[in-house]
Image (spheres, helix red, strand yellow):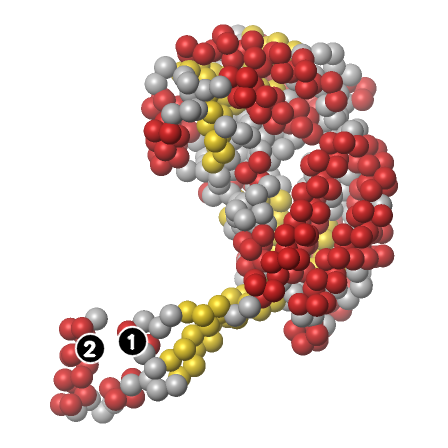
């Protein structure tokens, strides 16, 4: 979208969409998007291989499958989601009826990152279309092949007065943020999220911010270590660890430290052969610097496989002996580096988690329900996963989102539909007795009001 008048064209169609973009039309748009994805599956594989060096099977698993699942779930649930919802009257509202009517917000902006460049563009778009909105989608300029393919797919599948794709760099994003969108959905870092929120404030535009953070893992003394290692390593090798809900670091009970280390080493050897490359030279250099800083400050850094700097390939690394002064202790890693930190009492871990910015996810591996409940109740995070990692992102009937530094608002399923909707209250009077206490406040009216105060 090179010309910002495109926003005006989409905005001009808002009233028409409210009249004509109903259940049938929304389902048709979702079906058209699904057909485009299925028809262009090979092209999607090629684009993600060009941008991220990702294997086709992993692209199917982490890009296509989540989008297709979201489309299917949304399409089958949409009639129920769009239906007005009754609200029971309170005592003061006797004689009235109330309902909430979902209303499209209008024209929304979706700003997507580079780590899952297809899925993180289209998953919020599915929710936006389901809610009846038009949308401008801005993919990351760091994944140009996927961005170009997305622009073509959207243009072929959906009308230009419904969805447009804006290609370009930071200057395009900044120009878009100057427009008075009705909602902005941003996925990215907390630093950029603050800038998006600041820009949105000029128009009082509501925002959903899907950010990140250092998502910790706790491995309890009774954990199934084979299960824990399998899930932790998968979260670290998937997309080369460039996952917003990926496990950042692991707290393990001291009695299980050696055994977990051995299990992790075996899993890295088993799963680590098909890791995509790091997205860009700057991010690759940052990860190398994190590992080197840890080694320079006394940590033991164990690589699992060779590096290929020319192709931006970075082997997974286990980091033991992390100190508070190390960069891996404070920076979100967002890559295949895994600090392993022993603990003796879970209260120590809870104290460290609560002292840090609130993470997007927290993972617990334990059989002890009491330990799980203790950690869940005494910490704050966007979500909690028990005996798994990453999948808190993928449950269609659970809202996904952060808290505090890890974001605000929610996505996916009904939560995504409501994010892009205004739930408009409609209150209708049938036989409200309230006029009996309208002014003037004579003796009878005062007695009635007094009776109401005593009853309520």
Q: Secondary structure at mark 2?
A: helix
The reply to whether residue 303 is in sight is yes
Is disc 1 surrounded by few (<14), some (14 to 19) or many (20+) residues within 10 Å?
few
Residue 41 vs 216, above or below: the answer is below
Q: Percent x, y for residue 20?
A: 70, 74
Residue nearest the viewer, comparing 351 with 123: 123
Q: Is residue 215 left or right of residue 72?
A: left
Q: Where, quadrant-wise, is the N terminus in this rendering?
A: bottom right
Q: Percent x, y for residue 18?
A: 65, 73
Residue nearest the viewer, comparing 72 with 265: 72
Q: Which mark is residue 429?
A: none
Residue nearest the viewer, comparing 371 with 124: 371
Is disc 2 surrounded by few (<14), some (14 to 19) or many (20+) residues within 10 Å?
few
Residue 256 occupies which quadrant of the picture?
top left
Q: Which residue occupies 86% across, 41% down? A: 43
Asked whether the beta carbons under mark 1 and mark 2 sit within 8 Å of each other, the answer is yes
Q: Percent x, y for residue 342?
A: 44, 14
Query: Which callout, 1 or 2, points at the residue further toward the start of the chain?
Result: 1
- Compute the Cα span from label 1 to label 2: 9 Å
Residue 41 occupies which quadrant of the picture?
top right
Q: Is residue 255 left or right of residue 155?
A: left
Q: Label 1, on which residue?
A: 92
Q: Which residue occupies 45% across, 17% down? A: 252
Q: Which residue occupies 57% across, 63% down? A: 80
Q: Where, quadrant-wise, is the C terminus in this rendering?
A: bottom left
Q: Percent x, y for residue 121?
A: 70, 48
Residue at the front extreme, as displayed: 76
Q: Secondary structure at mark 1?
A: helix
Total of numbered circles in the picture?
A: 2
Q: Label 2, on which residue?
A: 452
């Amino acid at each position: 979208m090179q010309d910002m008048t495109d926003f005006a064209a989409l905005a001009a169609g808002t009233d028409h969409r409210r009249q004509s973009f109903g259940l049938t039309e929304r389902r048709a748009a979702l079906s058209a998007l699904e057909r485009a994805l299925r028809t262009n599956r090979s092209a999607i594989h090629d684009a993600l291989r060009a941008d991220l060096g990702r294997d086709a099977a992993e692209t199917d698993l982490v890009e296509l499958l989540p989008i297709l699942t979201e489309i299917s779930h949304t399409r089958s649930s949409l009639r129920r989601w769009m239906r007005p919802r009754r609200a029971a009257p309170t005592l003061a509202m006797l004689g009235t009826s109330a309902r909430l009517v979902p209303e499209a917000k209008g024209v929304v902006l979706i700003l997507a990152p580079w780590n899952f460049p297809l899925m993180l563009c289209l998953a919020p778009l599915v929710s936006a279309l389901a809610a009846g909105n038009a949308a401008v989608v801005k993919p990351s300029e760091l994944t140009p092949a996927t961005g170009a393919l997305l622009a073509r797919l959207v243009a072929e599948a959906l009308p230009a007065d419904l969805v447009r794709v804006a290609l370009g760099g930071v200057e395009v994003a900044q120009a878009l943020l100057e427009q008075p969108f009705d909602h902005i959905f941003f996925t990215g870092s907390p630093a950029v999220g603050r800038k998006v929120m600041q820009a949105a404030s000029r128009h009082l535009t509501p925002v959903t911010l899907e950010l990140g953070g250092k998502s910790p893992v706790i491995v309890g003394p009774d954990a199934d270590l084979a299960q824990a290692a399998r899930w932790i390593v998968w979260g670290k090798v998937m997309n080369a660890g460039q996952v917003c809900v990926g496990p950042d670091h692991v707290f393990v009970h001291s009695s299980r430290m050696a055994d977990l280390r051995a299990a992790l080493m075996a899993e890295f050897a088993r799963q680590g052969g098909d890791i995509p490359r790091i997205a860009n030279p700057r991010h690759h250099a940052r990860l190398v610097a994190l590992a080197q800083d840890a080694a320079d400050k006394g940590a033991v850094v164990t690589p699992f496989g060779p590096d290929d700097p020319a192709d931006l390939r970075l082997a997974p690394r286990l980091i033991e002996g992390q100190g508070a002064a190390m960069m891996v202790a404070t920076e979100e890693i967002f890559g295949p580096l895994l600090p392993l930190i022993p603990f003796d009492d879970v209260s120590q871990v809870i104290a460290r988690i609560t002292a840090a910015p609130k993470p997007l996810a927290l993972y617990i591996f334990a059989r002890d329900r009491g330990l799980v409940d203790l950690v869940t109740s005494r910490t704050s995070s966007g979500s909690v996963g028990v005996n798994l990692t990453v999948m808190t992102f993928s449950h269609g009937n659970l809202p996904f989102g952060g808290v505090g530094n890890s974001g605000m608002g929610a996505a996916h399923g009904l939560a995504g539909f409501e994010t892009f909707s205004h739930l408009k209250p409609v209150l209708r009077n049938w036989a409200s007795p309230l006029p009996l206490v309208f002014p003037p406040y004579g003796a009878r009216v005062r007695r009635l009001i007094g009776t109401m105060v005593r009853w309520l």
